[in-house]
Amino acid sequence: MRFPLVASVALLLACPSVGQVAPTPSLVPMPASVQEASGELSLDRNFSVALTGPNDPILERGIHRFIEQLSHETGLGFTNARAVSGNATLLIHTDQATDKVQKFGTDESYALSVTASRVNLSAPNPLGILHGLETVLQLVKVNSKGFFIPEVTIHDQPRFPWRGLLIDVGRHFIPLDVLKRNLDAMAAVKMNVLHWHLYDNEGFRIESKRFPKLQAEGSDGQYYSQDEIREFIAYAHDRGIRIVPEFEMPGHSRSMFVGYPELASGPGPYRMEPGATDAAMDPTSEGTYKFIDKFMDEMTKLFPDEYVHIGGDEVNGHEWDANPNIQRFMHAHGMKSNQDLQAYFNQRVQTILSKHHKIMIGWDEVLHPDLPKTVVVQSWRGQQSLATAAQQGYRGILSFGYYLDLMWPASRHYAVDPMSGQAASLNEQDKKRILGGESCMWSEWVTPENIDSRVWPRNAAIAERLWSPAEVQDSASMYARLDRLSRRLQWLGLHHKSALGPGLERMSDSQEVTPLRTLAEVVEPVKDYQRMENLDRSKTIWDFRAPLVRLVDIARPESDQARQFRNAVQAYLASGEKNRAAADGIRKTLALWRDNDMKLRPFIDQSFLTQELGPLSADLSLLGSAGLFALDYLDRGAQSPAAWRSQQLAMTESAASPKADLLLVIVEPVRQLIEASAMSTPVDGTAR
Amino acid sequence: MRFPLVASVALLLACPSVGQVAPTPSLVPMPASVQEASGELSLDRNFSVALTGPNDPILERGIHRFIEQLSHETGLGFTNARAVSGNATLLIHTDQATDKVQKFGTDESYALSVTASRVNLSAPNPLGILHGLETVLQLVKVNSKGFFIPEVTIHDQPRFPWRGLLIDVGRHFIPLDVLKRNLDAMAAVKMNVLHWHLYDNEGFRIESKRFPKLQAEGSDGQYYSQDEIREFIAYAHDRGIRIVPEFEMPGHSRSMFVGYPELASGPGPYRMEPGATDAAMDPTSEGTYKFIDKFMDEMTKLFPDEYVHIGGDEVNGHEWDANPNIQRFMHAHGMKSNQDLQAYFNQRVQTILSKHHKIMIGWDEVLHPDLPKTVVVQSWRGQQSLATAAQQGYRGILSFGYYLDLMWPASRHYAVDPMSGQAASLNEQDKKRILGGESCMWSEWVTPENIDSRVWPRNAAIAERLWSPAEVQDSASMYARLDRLSRRLQWLGLHHKSALGPGLERMSDSQEVTPLRTLAEVVEPVKDYQRMENLDRSKTIWDFRAPLVRLVDIARPESDQARQFRNAVQAYLASGEKNRAAADGIRKTLALWRDNDMKLRPFIDQSFLTQELGPLSADLSLLGSAGLFALDYLDRGAQSPAAWRSQQLAMTESAASPKADLLLVIVEPVRQLIEASAMSTPVDGTAR
């Protein structure tokens, strides 16, 4: 009989034991002020919603979505919940109607009170109502009597007015349905800006009717039509989210030069091909500015937001250096460096944008005293450059520390505060110039399939940092609430949890994905830019067209299992009592890892996608085994032999090095167990 | 330290061990003729597709979808795969263009050959090409070199020309996006008819511009606009699927009478309310036929298919009996029974449909010698009524045995053959009148959330029955192929696998769903109409508006885990050798079940949705425990005491009774273990 018996570390570790529940209220982001009470409002089919204030179709649609979502999450069909009477369960009031174009800096506060019979939600502006409705959805819980909303009084407003997510659709095209569900998730955590990085060297993604070769020759056919963009902007507007478009120039824009090589500084031709590029616009040609003027004329009509991002980062200047005309121009105008040339370019572009009634945003590099103070600087370099800009009178937003593509844990992003570092010592007036922040989802390694898992749930930790009071900092509370939120995001259609299974099944074309999943759940993609650097080292060119279906592409950026194991080991090592029960949990997990390689091995060579995982799988087994031995010493109160320890510690060092662009993120707690076994005490903690 | 350690039977049993792979080729439905060879065609970015034959936008879109799907499933971006050259990897040829309206009985055959360098796909009609492309997608596999298509020659055509799925959107509204993904899945298994049961007593779901009170008063606001319907029909047409609308009359149509009570036989008024109804149209009123004529005039223009279903089932006649005018009419026309009256009604309706150039279909009850032979009979009563109809010259389709709402295992549906029973002894001419079959998804207990899991993957077994040669009958092969297909359906966006997790999380509002999942994966909803009968017994009325979020609503209709455990126990009991290894697998599973109640118990009373599961959870524990004892006796070759056995068998009887509308479907194999322990032999099999 063939009868498989394997256990999964996913299920061993994914669930906290009884009693370990999320802090109440389990809200992300945590509101500015919360007062809880002990009663509750029961939810049943009679639940109804009434709205007083000006007639507002956007708010009506928001209430409709709220009712649908509440129906979906509870199974109660509130099809007739929209009431006109003041006797409704949920009474909503706002004095204003939604602005036709959402303005930066609108009051987003709201007040929410839940009693046993009534919910009151009021806000100066419909944006606050939308935020409050998301809070109500997050408050819903279940008990032995049914679904309910606990009694609570909340006064809430954001700490920063600019809370954005950048999504790069240049390197990899992301279809609108995928972007829409990400907007839904952004609304759920009260983010209010989608910074749409609409093209880059690798692809131009907007339809231009004036310059149709932009999308026709600058993409693989994957771009958004203007009708689609208008519909998408309306979708975002319905959810209280501004769409800020980025038209990157003068660099990061090779895709524009494929159809319009005359814009570029080099001789061309330019092609859609893998590898780096020096391509940059020619800032000395009047034709360039004529093009930008016409292009912006078209684009600023398409995108209603007052702000337009012009990129402006990472121009290496090689094309400028190599072009004698440009060199002559610089000399004639007394420009000493490429920075001067780019400042000139930015000024010209700023003048054009100003003519089209837009405010310019650019990356750090645009900062130059010649630019007017209306310009907003987005810092990818750190709080320091943000503070410097603020002192010079420029407003800024922080993205340093919020790069989701670097694969950092949520806690590390969470610890980054726009007002920390040099910004903390700014005076009050300068501080106000720091508008908030934006997480960035650069898409070199991102596809429609894996983007949800790259953005969520980690992005919610950044959303909380930008919304909640600065004092909200407890990382354990954040993780507990993030976990509940992450499950709720599934109801909004996000694939961040569900994509892993099919991804693993594709790798093996086999039903037997359990050992593969066990491995997948304790690895994380390498951090920072190491994946790209690994490519360089082996002299392979990065090819944006390459398939992204390896384990590194589907493994989650942050392993919940590893985090829970790490916490478990730390608690075990710190605790004087109950050690045996704690050790038992750790032991079973380690045994699972030790035995996993044996189960995975027979499959691993059957697929080109699993072949590269052999060394990782072997390391996991060694770590499990070493951890078990260490635990035995600890459990018996016996000191482990020094020779054994040094051998095992060498093994952990080897296991800590990345393989297949993945890190085994349980090395550190296993190392701790091994080191602790050097000074074991009996389990009753009587001696140390 | 709190450190959870639980294992899930899902993962213990969901995966067969190494070597247990699906039969090759793993296709559903199995083609009529397959010849395999040993070579393979490697898939890489150079893969391209060319089409020769008439210009055909529908086929172009089909090829586009194929390329997208192949890109998605392999990660290879075939964005430029559409080639015009005859040197393409996949050469497609057909002589015809797609019919503007898909005709019943079109040749759907195709021929497919895969060599190491080329795929040839040809078909007399584009429908065959669409089917062949689905076959190609199912053929794709992975090995150590990459993704590939194995060399194979296939000649394929359907056994029956009518292979349908009925979806009832009357009892519960199913949005079009959910229906669309079900169309995608139907196309994947080569089904060609969606029978759209568009309304019923509980809701009218189509916009009528002529009779707007139908949808306005006969629904809760959830219905399809005519534009949406047209778009949906085009979506189906693109996928080789005909949409056959059902306009149920004279019964099952209370929702029509809410707005138009004059159509009904009773005094009214009629309301959208829970409970049974006797409501039926008045067949004696000329106004009824005038309405039907106008309504059909509108609807037959909306739905282009040549066939229109008029329902005609389950008229209890109470309203006719109670209406003196109707009684007078029957007497005056010499009608002896309500059957005669309904036959008269059907004749009148048939005449109207005929005038609008449509062929009438109805359920068994419509069969009456006065009807013309063009009428098609759909049998929910069995092969016998189908055979009788065929003998009388009527064409028929089988639905008896294909009711997905009865929660049968796939194997039971699979065993039902339209040509079995009385149909088997029909002469050749009469046999040809049996057009095929239709599975039926009645939606009393079905919602947008759970419909995918109610239809899939079981419906694919029915699709195979209707497409593949009659000799394709091996249930084990079917299950192995179904399992692979079920995983592939996730790539089409089906939620049949992914909906369980969020459903369980809703029940408990807790991260700790693992023990709940362990229980959920070994239960199945009660079979046949027992859930409805349970309601009657307790004097509760069925309320179509009630929330469907209990475990019975989210548990899968067929437990893979139970099936695998059943197979494992049978193999263990039958095998003379290797018993110890086999027993070990069974033992771990039984221990998991035995210990699960202890893990679930602390949570179970925290939610009204889990409270009812206590007795089931206790039973699972007792079964695990009893099975372990029995296995010990078997393993030791010792006979179990008779008193213990009778006590345990009594326990299994109690555990076999439904609780919370659920069945613990592992009772039978545990009972087998207990009974086998009465005649144990040592494990080496030397004595018996």
Image: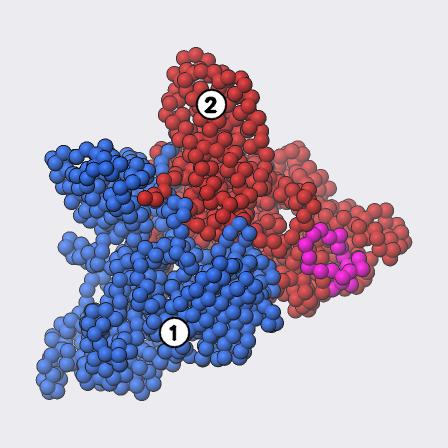
Chain colours: A blue, B red
Does B495 appear in magenta? no
Is residue B512 among the parts visible in the rendering?
yes
Depth check: give the residue in front, A58 or B614.
Answer: B614
Quadrant including the N terminus of chain A: top left
Under circle 2, the secondary element is helix
Q: Looking at the magenta stretch, what is its main secondary structure?
A: loop
The quarter of the displayed image where residue A444 is located: bottom left
Does B272 appear in magenta? yes
Residue at 70% over, 64% down:
B295
- Vertical order, A234 against B492 (above or below): below
Disc 2 crowd, CA 10 A, few/some/many (<14, 14-19, 20+): many
Under circle 1, the secondary element is strand
Rendering coords of residue A474 (x, y %): 31, 59
Chain part drawn in magenta: B260-281
Kind of residue at disc 1: Arg
Residue at 34% over, 58% down:
A478
Quadrant including the C terminus of chain A: top left
Residue at 54% over, 37% down:
B615
Residue ID for mark 2 = B630
Depth check: give the residue in front, A370 or A294.
Answer: A370
The quarter of the displayed image where residue B298 is located: bottom right
* Total count of labels: 2
Q: Chain of mark 2?
A: B
Residue B681: mark in rendering: none
Rendering coords of residue B319 (x, y %): 80, 53
Residue ID for mark 1 = A242
